[in-house]
Image (cartoon, rainbow, N blue to C red):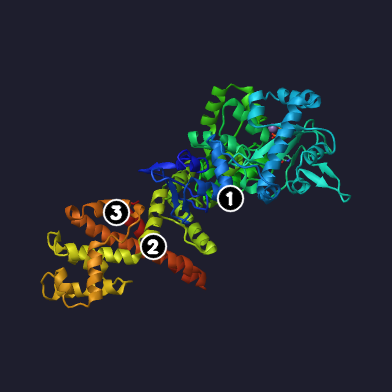
Amino acid sequence: MNAARVDEVVGEFVNLKKRGVNLLGLCPFHNEKTPSFTVSPAKGIYKCFGCGKAGNSVNFIMDHESLSYPEALRYLADKYNIEIEETVLAKEEIEQKTERDSLYILMSAAQKYYSERLHEDEEGKTIALTYLKERALTPKTIEGFQLGWSSLGRDDFSQWAIKNGYNREYLVKTGMSFETEQGSLFDRFRERIMFPIHNIAGKIVGFGGRILRSNAKEAKYINSPETDIYNKSKILYGLFQARKAIRQRDEALLVEGYMDVLALHQAGIEHAVASSGTSLTDDQLRLVKRFTDNITFLFDGDAAGQKAALRAIDMALELELNVKMLLLPADHDPDSFVKAYDIEYVEQYFKDHSQNFIAFRIGLLPEDVLRDPIKKSEIVREMLNSVVLIKDIIKRNLYLREISKLLDFDEKVLNDELRRMAASKFKKDNKAPDLTLAEPQVISQEQAIRSQATAVNQEKQLLKVLLLYGSRMYTDDMTSAQFIYRETSGMEWENDHCRILFERYREATEQENNLADVNFLIHDQPEEMRRFVYDVITERYQLSPGWEKFLRRTVVSPDANYKEEVKSAIGYLKFTKISKIVEENQKGVALLETDEAIDELFMLQQVLLNMRKQLAVELGIG
Ligand code: CTP
Ligand code: MN
């Protein structure tokens, strides 16, 4: 437990950024767009404010890798080169090992088998290794990506595996072997260069196999099927090897092919990954987002590549990734490009030719489109359809400006159109387009408020400042109490005690023009109420660390800064109440029948969102 530092163990899978004494990242256990997953190196634990998962290094590995407790210990021991003595497993215990584990073991054995064929067999050396050298792959790359070779025989691998005690059921389950009706096995991969596909923990979950010479009758690549351990839409080829570079560069480079990944890594561009054997999925982008917010797409310039690019852009924008597009000179793919030029040139080229998606799209258009106003406005609308996916208002405005500049279009018109689109998207999705809140921190703080600080707690907080500072002047001609009354007029209270005490205090101060004090307030109250007041004044409502940090200013030195306290107590309470209404509206949309009603709600919603944003700024959380 001493060796397996939680920040290191978790850091292998989650991109953690420093936030005070803790680290913060995107929770790997649920889909979140803004980080609320905290790791405390001092306490040795992680905690997710979004889904509530928490634990230490071992729990994390158990949960994340779906391992049992002893398996997680083995995993960590392995990672830190700690030897653990285990008794030799009895036969039944071997059978008890989880099936997934068995599949992993088989895949790992297959990788070793295929690598041996490549490096040791005559056939492998003369045919396959020679081919890889022709493609200018170095031994280091071949090693690093654990490439292999599957021989000609129809069942070489299957036979070897059976002979070495691997269960035939698993051979079939992993798709490494096919079983005939007569019950004999034959190999999926024959006469192919083998590319093992790793999950981010480095375990092999499948293979891609490339035929040596193009051959019209057979597919260039054959891939492992989906299995219990290989979910294609959630795996990126090369991510295991690329993850460190992605974190260091704070960027991922997405390319199309296995060979491209290899060539780029070999050239020193080690943040390249590919979606293997599928078109890019949402989940693959989520995987990227665990490591970085910045993604650059390097697609082929052909029509299929362009279409893939447009789809990828929208998916990435929706996940709040910052998207850059990179086009190579005609006739080049990444593989050929890095081989044709030295690394300085390549890096410089990448830097100079990365475009935002607006410029990229415009670049794809034929000249005459821009001269035709109708076509041009269609293009603009198309681009706005992407921009509307961006939640960050600042970024969205930057893109609007970009469109306006590059296409010579009035920014105001663009903005109006965008709002219209946002409104109809709102109707379609039954959810509010976040037209206001922007920065990730804002939303995670907002989440903190929502989960930690219920409206009731904030009502108590407000009551507390009223009781403690109500008599003090807020401005030259207004007491803090008067300020609070003004700001909360018409507010509905959630907590009855709070409401009663608040009203009582107000009546006392207003009618008698006499400042009430706490004793006055409770002298005739039942025991229960007195205790409540006492609690309100002294308690901190077991604030969570996040919440406390967030209120530190006020929690730590209340007396020194009572105006601040009054102001923020009101601010937080309003913020929470507004958030609640916003949420209710989001749900309520589904119940509305007419367009008019929806439009009206949407207008209201916008007002609320703006108010909330304004409050966030005032509270220093925006
Ligand atoms: N692919 C596939 N099945 C095919 C063809 C392609 O799964 N029949 C996938 C592979 O992941 C491949 C990627 O699509 O890596 C891109 O294809 P391609 O550009 O043809 O392959 P490269 O990896 O560039 O290989 P090479 O340079 O050797 O042609
Ligand atoms: Mn290629």
Local crowd at mark 3 within 10 Å, few (<14), some, or many (≥20)? some
Sequence-wise first label, 3 or 1: 1
Count of marks placed on residues: 3
Q: Earlier in the sequence, mark 1 or mark 2?
A: 1
Distance in Å between CA atoms under marks 3 and 2: 18 Å
Query: Which amino acid lies under the numbered mark 2 shown in the image of this protein?
Result: Ser
Question: In the image, is 244 to the left or to the right of 116?
Answer: left
Tell me what residue is drawn at x 57 percent, y 31 percent.
270
Q: Nearer the viewer, residue 7 or 469?
A: 7
Counting from the top left corner in percent of width and height, residue 381 is at 54, 51
Which residue bears the numbered disc 1? 68
- Ligand 2 is found in which quarter of the picture? top right
> To which residue does mark 3 refer?
551
Q: Residue furthest top?
A: 342
Q: Residue 456 location, x and y as percent?
A: 33, 67
- Earlier in the chain: of badge 3 and badge 2, it is 3
Q: Nearer the viewer, residue 283 or 120?
A: 120
Label 2 element class: helix
**Which residue is at a point 62% across and 42% down the rendered structure image?**
87
Identify residue for label 2: 579
